[in-house]
Image (spheres, rainbow, N blue to C red):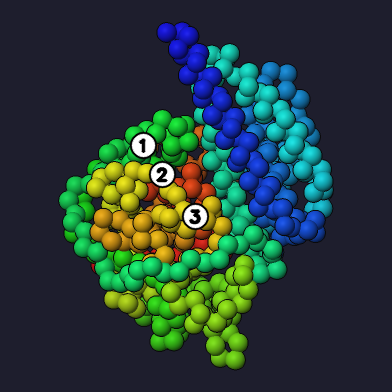
Amino acid sequence: MALLLETSKQNLATEIAELYQSVRARTLEIVAPLEIEDYVIQTAEFMSPPRWHIGHTSWFFETVLQKYQTGYQTYSDDFLFYFNSYYEGFGARIERPKRGTRSRPTVVETKKYRARIDEQMSRFIKQLSEREDAETILSIVRLGLEHEMQHQELLVYDIKHLLCDQFDAPMKPLPASLQSVSGMAEIEGGLVELGFGGTGVPPVSHTQDARATFAWDNEKPAHKVFLEDFQIDRAPVSNGDYLEFIKAGGYQDFRWWHSAGWAQVNQEQWQAPLYWEQQDGEWMIRDFAGLHAATDKLSEPVSHVSFLEASAYAKWAGKRLPTEAEWEKAATHSAAGFPWGEDPPNESHGNLFENGLWSTAPIGAFPNGQSADGCHQMIGDVWEWTTSDYVPYPGFKSEFDEYNDKWFVGQKVLRGGSFATPQIHIRSTYRNFFYPHERWMIGGFRCAK
Ligand SMILES: [Fe+2]
């Protein structure tokens, strides 16, 4: 028995060690096309310079070494100060809007720091299985890797804000639409199970692989909610749909907007989603591939809209946004797993980071990923706004201080992942959250009724 336990600890350690290598390498692949000057610029208060991300994700692992590696010597107090994000428990830190006001630590120093942490972490993970607390530590390392995947996605948002089409992204060509998708799916309500660990997810069912067993504390516990029958769009709202709203004067008509939305429209002079610009009276959309006429992108999901804009569109269209429970019910195949079933996502199910598009894909490009009710692209392409407030599920227990629990006020839940989300990072139960006015992330929506 003791030997068996020893072997399973060893296996887990080996799996986590492999995952560590691949996740850490991907962060560096994402930033590889950057020039050294690009790493230090902060183009808005809400974004962070790329150098900060590559240091901060290493800082996270340094806190693990500090806590669990006996005799660990802190790399540098200055680095602890600069690379801490928002953790009060880890001491003083630079304010977020000021991350771009310093040229030190330099990019070269930051990369050296990263390599040093990797070296120490690899050695640390290897000798872990001899320890009593191996599983606790491995689960924190695992959490650190999920944290890093979140920062990989943030890097894509931030690099887009920084450079957009000046960034030399290793883009693959966009797939064609294979199926026309329209109308709304009718979903039967009743008592449904929401959250991770219930019948509605594949926690360990499709594979024993440690990669498939992770979920954040905010997705737990699974619990029952009652839903009325509802309808939900089979496709995300497209640029074409949204252009109609703009042309119908949507941004000039207070009737469609929440009070906070109308105030924001006036204050920020919003007339279209972020990255849309007007040229000779025509709407254009700028993305990693360049500047395109919106009319060439009509069939792609609209992105870079805030919750406020999504809500206004829904009201104008005579619909509403779904709740997160409705979204999850629609995205869960016969009470198990992903919209298409239990298999983990692959490139034919949806547009995630591994597809390498660096862009939304046309609606209908992923028929393999559709749900039993014919809802397309629920996983991938754009995070989808819901009307639900980001609050703890009943019975919530914090598994890591200051990670998810301190954000349970004032934000809205988004579901489904985007083209910048790694495949192993997404689940139907995944709850992302942003403030209602934010739109630099890859956020879109579909409507319900
Ligand atoms: Fe972070």
Query: Which residue is identified by label 3?
Result: 352
Name the kind of residue labelled 1 in the image.
Answer: His
Image height of 359 relative to 2, above or below: below
Could you tell me if residue 78 is visible in this image?
Answer: no
Name the kind of residue labelled 3 in the image.
Answer: Leu
Q: At numbered mark 2, what does the secondary structure look like: helix, strand or loop?
A: loop
Q: Quadrant of residue 123?
A: top right
Expressed as whole percent of the image width and height from the top left, the position of residue 362 reads 45, 69
What is the crowding at mark 1: few (fewer than 14 residues within 10 Å), some, or many (at least 20)?
some
Front residue of this view, candidates 59 and 359 = 359
- Tell me the residue at 45%/49% (across/down): 346
Expressed as whole percent of the image width and height from the top left, the position of residue 275 reads 58, 73
- Tell me the residue at 61%/77% (across/down): 291
Image height of 160 relative to 17, above or below: below
Cα separation, mark 3 vs mark 1, equals 20 Å
Q: Earlier in the sequence, mark 2 or mark 1?
A: 1
Q: Is residue 215 left or right of residue 151?
A: left
The circle on residue 206 is 1
Marks 3 and 2 close (CB-CB < 8 Å): no
The circle on residue 145 is none
Q: Is residue 390 left or right of residue 289?
A: left
Query: Which residue is identified by label 2?
Result: 344
